[in-house]
Amino acid sequence: DIVVTQSPDSLAVSLGERATINCKSSRSVLNSSNNKNYLSWYQQKPGQPPKLLIYWASTRESGVPDRFSGSGSGTDFTLTISSLQAEDVALYYCQLYYSAPYTFGQGTKLEIK
Amino acid sequence: QVQLVESGGGVVQPGRSLRLSCAVSGFTFSSYGMHWARQAPGKGLEWVAFIWYDGSNQYYADSVKGRFTISRDDSKNTLYLQMNSLRVEDTAVYYCARAGWAATAGSGMDVWGQGTTVTVSS
């Protein structure tokens, strides 16, 4: 099975500053046949289900603000929030879906400094 | 609009069974693969199971393999999770979610239900 490691576990960033969350896979999730990376990012606020932010590592879901961006390829990926807003306080998870099991990272708690 | 509504959660003793349902609306259910995921109290997300759009293939997390069965009834627009031999560690909020960009393998979740709570306790 592919193992996913997400870092950091928690992160405190000032309003308006950049937040960066990392996700590392034990094996490449790049499919050479379609040149797509099988990784998504989710945001979860307390008492709510997760919300899809990014898929194919860098494609923003419809309606997601453009301050959220995803990057990386192969085994190393990053979620960046370019200018942190108060409403971005949440837990963030990456997920690999290259092959089952479709493992989630352990999550990153993002707070305001 | 697209909607997924889970039901069937509750309190159950270890070793017993429970069946969760996920009623969907707002999209063509038979065209989409579907996932179950769960979240134990205060813990992170755990993917549980996935079924192809046509029900021909299912995949499971090692933690539930042999005990849980994912299935679907396209005539009822409903996804199921049959949970047998329940353990205390199966206590969690269970979410159903739509596979957003592939009807077969290789898709994450683009729409999620609100979840149903399962508590396994003696």
Image: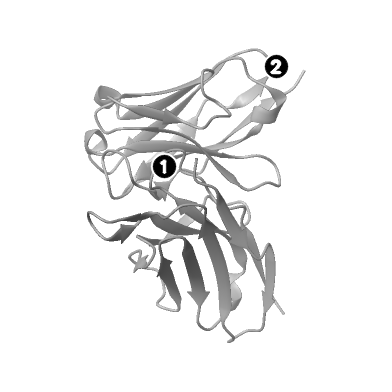
Res. A13 image quadrant: bottom right
Q: In this picture, is A16 found above or below A54?
A: below
Label 1 sits on a secondary structure element that is strand
Q: Name the chain letter of the residue that bears numbered label 1.
A: B
> Can you say which quadrant of the picture contains the C terminus of chain B?
top right
Q: Give the x, y percent position of residue B25.
A: 31, 39
Residue at left offset 51%, top offset 18%: B66
Label 2 sits on a secondary structure element that is loop
In the foreground, A57 or B101 = A57
Left or right for A24, reference B11: left
Q: Which residue is mark 2?
A: B14
Q: In this picture, is A43 found above or below B83?
A: below
Residue at left offset 63%, top offset 62%: A108
Disc on the earlier residue, 1 or 2 = 2
Left or right for A81, reference B122: left
Residue at left offset 59%, top offset 86%: A17
Q: Name the chain letter of the residue that bears numbered label 2.
A: B
Say which mark, if any, is on residue B111: none
Q: Give the x, y percent position of residue B23.
A: 38, 32
Distance (Cα) linking label 1 and label 2 = 26 Å
Q: Give the x, y percent position of residue A71.
A: 42, 71
Disc 1, disc 2: CB below 8 Å? Answer: no
Crowding at dot 2, Cα within 10 Å, few <14 / some 14-19 / many 20+, comes out as some
Q: Amino acid at mark 2?
A: Pro
Q: Which residue is mark 1?
A: B97
